[in-house]
Image: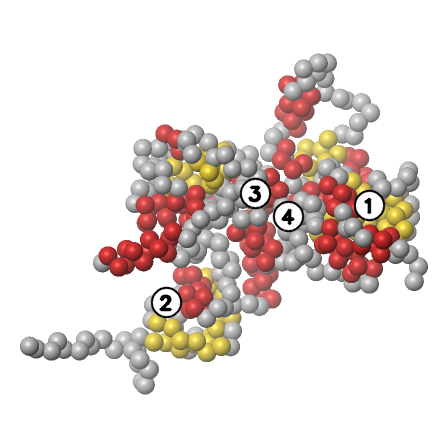
Amino acid sequence: MGKIRMATSWLDGCSGCHMSLLDMDEQLIDIVGKVDIVYGPLVDAKVIPEGIDVVLVEGAVSTDADVEKLRLLRERSAILVSLGDCAVTANVPGMRNRFPLAEVLKRGYEENAPLNAQIPREDLPHLLDKARPLHEFVPVDVFLPGCPPPADAIVYMLQELLAGRIPDLSNKSRFGA
Amino acid sequence: MTIPAYPTFPRGDSELGKPVGILTLKIDDRDVSARRGETILEVARENDIFIPTLCYLEGLSSLGACRLCLVEIKGVTKLLPACVTPVRQDMEVVTDSERLRRYRRMILELIFSERNHVCSVCVSNGHCELQTLAQKLGMTHVRFDYLYPRLAIDASHERFSIDHNRCVLCMRCVRVCDEIEGAHTWDIMHRGISARVITDLNQPWGESETCTGCSKCVQVCPTGALSEKGKSVAEMVKHKEFLPYLQIMRRNER
């Protein structure tokens, strides 16, 4: 059996889900033998390749760049996994959602900046009005909640996906984990 | 010395050959017996049959507010809440079906979408009845758009705080304060999606003249809405064991 082509991506999140992915200890050796990581923060690929089998997406959708990236990943991947609470619920990035965007930017870049306070308007992705979960933008095949999802749940999910099954993950993790 | 007459009970049950006041019915195809006046939920629990609940709490009056305990009853087209539906002779109850699972999940998803339940940063993470139910009923995501309302936190009380972001309007605080503590500090204002729990006449909790500071409301709250001050993420463990003891003591005093 050839290796499957896996990508990972990190939108508006803290990278904790990627840490959890790496936290599977010796089981990582087994998984690495079965997958090629073709894109994501763990490898050096600059562009999203075609023909991805599985993509794990961490983080909420918070900017126009996130939307674009997510749509592209969806287009080029057979299975898209919503990995972790930020991807599944918007979680902590979503805590700004109850305040108007202008207020959020002012708070972050002016009120809390002692020096050179200014709201960045160039060269950075545009913040959306609200941070939202992935499935509000694209169809999602697998949901794995958790903050972060436990390494064992990620291992189980990958093994099931490698075996060609869409796993039931409801008893493997929970919101907030 | 006269021997007192053996007490007689009014015969309310037409079923011959059965002890008076005892009914027989089926729950999930199991034959069970019940006392007249018991609810479906009580009988199910006596027989170790699981029905999910959120607003129900043994020792408090039943409300039927959360609708998670909905069950199917043969011959009835509507779904009925098990916590406020009394059993009847020959009733056939179904507590688990595809239809019920679908509705229960939908109810949970609506609860999650209506306020800001951010488990990862909540004082009750890991000890929350809503979080546990979501996992138990297989809710891995919310299909409805989150509303992200802007809600207040009242930390004016010396020892406790109320975070409306986490409130599910189960009314356990309202009931325990009224029925057990006898203070009736808590109540609900407004209706539907704008409903909020309030202290006194919507005054800050810290200024409440009726609150005795007993903390019963905090202990029965199923989520992180009511908590003790000084508790950080995942540190708020509730103790509601006092409730059955209080009930037993009261019964024995009568």
Percent coordinates x, y for residue A129 in the rendering? 68, 33
Which residue reaches farthest left? B1
Percent coordinates x, y for residue A45 in the rendering? 91, 40
Q: Quick check: do tags 2 and 4 share a chain? A: no
In the rendered structure, which amino acid carries the disc numbered 3? Ala
Q: Which residue bears the numbered disc 1?
A: A8
Instruction: Tell me the chain of label 3.
Output: B
Q: Where the C terminus of chain B falls, by quadrant?
A: bottom left
Q: Earlier in the sequence, mark 3 or mark 2?
A: 2
Crowd around label 1: few <14 · some 14–19 · many ≥20 (10 Å): many
Residue at the image point whose x is 41% and y is 38% from the top: B198
The span from disc 2 to disc 4 (Cα, nearest Å) is: 37 Å
Q: Which residue bears the numbered disc 4?
A: A177
Instruction: Tell me the chain of label 4.
Output: A
Q: Earlier in the sequence, mark 4 or mark 1?
A: 1
Q: Where the N terminus of chain B falls, by quadrant?
A: bottom left
Q: Determine whether B190 is above or below A112 in the image.
A: below
Pick whichever, B242 or B221, lies toward us: B242
Which residue reaches farthest top? A115
Instruction: Tell me the chain of label 2.
Output: B
Percent coordinates x, y for residue B118 in the rendering? 60, 41
Q: Which secondary structure lies at badge 4? A: loop
Mark 3 vs mark 2, foreground winner is 3
The span from disc 1 to disc 2 (Cα, nearest Å) is: 54 Å
Q: Which mark is residue B38?
A: 2
